[in-house]
Image (cartoon, helix red, strand yellow):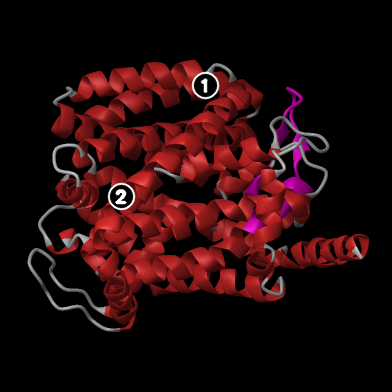
Amino acid sequence: MPSIENLLSTLNGFVWGPAMLFFILSTGLFLMVGLRLLPLRKLGFAFAQLFKGGRARGEGDISPFAALMTSLSATVGTGNIAGVATAIGIGGPGALFWMWCTALLGMATKYAEAVLAVHYRETDARGRKVGGPMYYIKNGLSQRWLWLATLFALFGMLAGFGIGNTVQASEVARVMHSTFQVPVWVSGAVMSVLVGIVLLGGVRSIARVASTLVPLMGIAYLLGCIGVIAQHLGEIPAALELIVHSAFNPVAAEGGFAGAAVMLAIRMGVARGVFSNEAGLGSAPIAHAAAETDSPVRQGSIAMLGTFLDTLVICTMTGLVIILTGVWTGDAEAAAMTASGFASAFPGVGDKFVAVTLVLFAFTTILGWSYYGERCAEYLFGVRVVIPYRILWTLAVFIGAVKGLGIAWLLADTLNALMAIPNLIALLLLSPVVFRLTIPWFAQQAQHEE
């Protein structure tokens, strides 16, 4: 096994090297400029659409609000707790700054993904709306690009078992065992049963659970973070200064922190930011393609809120807890670091609060990614693969819970990059379509308001 881990580590270092970081950030920047900073200018409009209650508009299987919650169920997971801590623990506080940059540009990327997903979606043999990168590559580009759609679907189907299944299940089992002394096999068995029950109802069942759990757990976690941060209000300016300074300057070793160069802060910030909000991976548009909407632009506006809420809100709060409490210089790693920060503010209950939150975050991520992987598998093999895929997915939850985490994290990072490559290529090639759909639509909206 050590040889496999070394191989994956080497491959991971290559696929998440400077070239990939530049590809992701430059694609987001290109889309942001081409959209005339629309994701930033129309943030209020996006929230207005969401607060209208996600009223059904046009064809689709779930409401626009439910599509966003399904998307968030997959992104709000261990990346928001363990991923942020890992980024800061390895790359220093500056990694949080680069997570912010990734998210700001990622809003444009996520918007473009959803616009294309709705515009090029299809109706499958069961009468369900299906879409995502494989479909906008297939229907938006010429036949010579079909191989790219196949690659994305293949990588997406496999990546789900890493980023959206075994990684989540393993982290839940580890935390439940260390915090509540629950045997890992018990955690695995309970998660498998619950996941299996939800998957029986398909996307509508996933959407119902996500629409209930995601807002509740998100608000509860934010309130917990606010409780910790409130005890360090006077230190917030210094923490923000440290974050910005560390983004452009090496950080010296301190306590359990080994020190970090600027490139390491950038690499960890971008990689963990993408792992958390998934902008550029092409996963979220698979959920948004199922939305009941009459406009790709309207759904794209709602979709970009996923990146804003996931990284600029939730990850930022986690990062501030870690930096303000000083646990980033200690020996704790991943979720244990975040738990230490909460425990320092709320002795005896803080670590348990993080454990329960992580369990809920990971559970909804498993549900959201089951839908992504299922749609990728359906694209490759047809609707007949749906039931076998759900069974295999449920079994993988148990296997992930009882096995180690190291290889799963490395494999998840590698497969993330392999998913991103065909999707980013498609976004660049189809960017004229995004601009053509977007600019006139908002111009027409402005005329109606006059």
Amino acid type assigned to the residue bearing label 1 in the image: Leu
State left or right for residue 337 relative to residue 188: left
Residue at the disc numbered 2: 227
276 or 234, which lies in front? 234
Instruction: Give the magenta range.
Output: 111-137
Residue at the disc numbered 1: 199
Mark 1 vs mark 2: in front: 2
- Neighbours of disc 1 within 10 Å: few (<14), some (14-19), many (20+): many
In terms of image quadrants, where is residue 165? top left
Give the image location of residue 11, x and y in percent: 32, 59
- For image coordinates 54% across by 16% down, the residue present is 200
Q: Is residue 222 magenta?
A: no
Q: Which mark is residue 217?
A: none
Sooner in the amino-acid sequence: mark 1 or mark 2: 1
Tell me the SS state at disc 1: helix
- For image coordinates 39% across by 16% down, the residue present is 193
Give the image location of residue 167, x and y in percent: 32, 40
Q: Is residue 237 above or below residue 330?
A: below
Q: Is residue 166 above or below residue 233?
A: above
